[in-house]
Image (cartoon, rainbow, N blue to C red):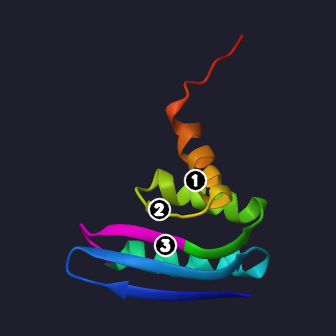
Amino acid sequence: MLRITTSSTSWSTTFKLEGELAGPWVKELEQCWQQALSTAQGQSLRVDLTSVTFIDAAGKALLHAMHQRGAEFIAVGCLTKFIIEEITRREAQPNRTQ
């Protein structure tokens, strides 16, 4: 189960996630994210992962897509920080074809 709480100010929208970012909950977050993108003109979009207990492959893929669209992440704990580092590092590495 995943609880998604959205809070907005004039300069940012934050999604606070609690629980597991997995299975059908990934699609639920994606829908919330798409809606925020359409209405958050010029606002920064943040994802608070401090209360997330598990992220599956689909959840990681969504976080990667969110990062590509400018999302900022808030994370604590070794595993969550590692996952976010892994997601953000993917874009920093150049593609090498041999």
Q: Secondary structure at mark 1?
A: helix
Q: Position of residue 1 (x, y in %)?
A: 74, 88
Q: Which of the 4 image quadrants contains residue 43?
A: bottom left
Q: Residues within 10 Å of mark 2 (few under 14, many from 20)?
A: many
* Foreground of the two, 62 or 14: 14
**Three-letter amino acid code at the position of disc 3:** Asp
Q: Position of residue 79 (x, y in %)?
A: 68, 57
Provide the residue designation for mark 3.
48
Q: Residues within 10 Å of mark 1 (few under 14, many from 20)?
A: some
The mark nearer the N terminus, 1 or 3, is 3
**Marks 1/2: CA distance?**
7 Å
Q: Is residue 46 above or below residue 35?
A: above
Q: Secondary structure at mark 3?
A: strand
**Marks 1/3: CA distance?**
11 Å
* Residue at horizontal 49 percent and vertical 72 percent from the top: 48
Q: Residues within 10 Å of mark 3 (few under 14, many from 20)?
A: some
Provide the residue designation for mark 2.
73
Question: How many dots with numbers?
Answer: 3
Q: Position of residue 66 (x, y in %)?
A: 51, 60
**Residue 23 falls left or right of residue 86:** right
Provide the residue designation for mark 1.
84
- Label 1 with label 2: CB-CB less than 8 Å: yes
* Residue at horizontal 72 percent and vertical 10 percent from the top: 98
Q: Secondary structure at mark 2?
A: strand
* Foreground of the two, 28 or 88: 88
